[in-house]
Amino acid sequence: MAQTSGNASKSLYIQVIAGVILGALLGHFWPVMAVEMQPFGEGFIKLVRMIIAPIIFVTVVVGIAKLSNAAEVGRIGLKAIIYFEIMTTFAMFIGLIVGHVVQPGTGLNIDPATLDRKAIARYADAPHQDVTGFLLNIIPNTVVDAFARGEILQVLLFAVLFGLGLSRMGEQGKGVTAFLDQAGGALFGVIAIIMRAAPLGAFGAMAFTIGRYGIGALAQLGMLMLCFYLTCAIFIFAIMGLVARMAGLNIFKIIAYVKEEFLLVLGTSSSEAAMPTLMAKLEGLGCGKSLVGLTIPLGYAFNLDGSSIYFTMAIAFIAQALNIPLSWSDYLMILAVLLLTSKGAATVVGGGFITLAATLATMNGKVPVAGMVLVLGVDRFMSEARAITNLFGNTVATIVVARWEGTLDVERARRILNKEEPPVITQA
């Protein structure tokens, strides 16, 4: 059974690679036809998003219901938030340093008066939530509304409360727990079916991106993209590598373990597309059902390492392109503002640009909000690096929190990463 599963995983891996390559070729040589492939990519992502809320619900409820101590829930959540804040702050700081030292926008000499604000009006004029609004938005109007809209944090809140209520029922609640546990197995079966369409989804998304924007668009802002991709790579292999080593594991083997999810994110530019299977793999590594169920959804809202690097680097680039000097006090203010604004827009569609607009608006006009139009053209190409960095960031975060909790068997995890032992889905 394990061999069959391994063969299927390898086959899917190869098919997704083929889908990405074929999509890129179609987009480059037949762009008009490639743009018409967009529904394949969007359809696949919608299929995955359809199943995310119920999977989070059953995973968290079953995990919490089986915990012997309900205080573990708060402790795990607090540790995860602390880790997220440290890593995202560090990511923002690295983005500022690289942007300041490399100066990717220097030499463009763009006159701020020539900027067309219409192109970014829907982001700049969008209402931005403050921290209070963001926290209140975690509470759904109704439970049904949370599931209907697919709001991850709202579903997570209800799942935690429902799991705690179920755990207080003792023996009477075991029947419901067993039912939800079996339902979870069925939901992951649905994911296995949906994943068969992953190559087609990756093909459609990549074909649309290259066909719509063209590889030639990369040349104009090539230095910014090169700096961003290299910074993300350094953050993954150096910073996350160090953190993984402190947890007792090797970052390269962790990346190899989630290679299917990596390719899926690369092809679709959406880290959500890999969320369900990533949760299953981290459970298989020994991180625990309840811990994974809490950490991963929280991470998708609060642990956006790739987005954090992008925010600070993009602001530095815009200022340099417009010949606007920024002092280190300006950079520190940007960092302080982003610590708040990046959380407020974490789960909003187009949240990256809304966050940029909100941050620039706090600088008293020093860097015009209309400057965002300078990165609008290549934002789609940089979204892959953001999503991949976010994926690996949440993978490592879950491992670190599990090690911090003392529930991760490091030796067993090493054997699994070395393919000496098959992963086994844990129950709590």
Image (spheres, rainbow, N blue to C red):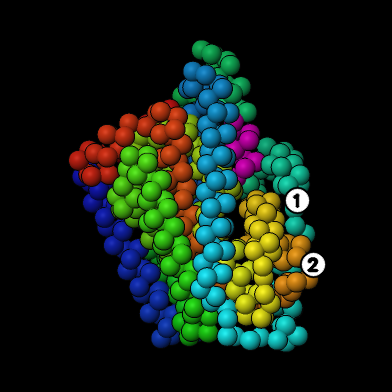
Lateral position of residue 12 relative to residue 360, left or right: left
264 over 2 or under it: above or below: below
Q: CA distance from mark 2 to mark 1?
A: 18 Å
Can you name the residue that lies furthest to the front here? 328
* Amino acid on which disc 1 is placed: Asp
Which of labels 2 and 1 is toward the front? 2
Camera sees residue 78: yes
- Residue at (62, 80) in percent of width and height: 321
- Residue at (43, 39) in percent of width and height: 400
Q: Residue 60: x, y in percent?
A: 52, 33
Q: Which residue is mark 2?
A: 364
- Closer to the camera in the image, 81 or 28: 81
- Residue at (67, 67) in percent of width and height: 327
- Closer to the camera in the image, 58 or 135: 135
- Closer to the camera in the image, 229 or 316: 316
Label 2 element class: loop
- Residue at (74, 41) in percent of width and height: 136
Instruction: Please identify the quarter of the rendering in which residue 17 is found.
Output: bottom left
Q: Mark 2: few, some, or many residues within 10 Å (few <14, many ≥20)? A: few
Q: Earlier in the sequence, mark 2 or mark 1?
A: 1
Number of marks in picture: 2
Q: Which residues are magenta?
A: 152-160
Q: Residue 57: x, y in percent?
A: 55, 36
Q: Which residue is mark 1?
A: 130
Q: Residue 216: x, y in percent?
A: 48, 85
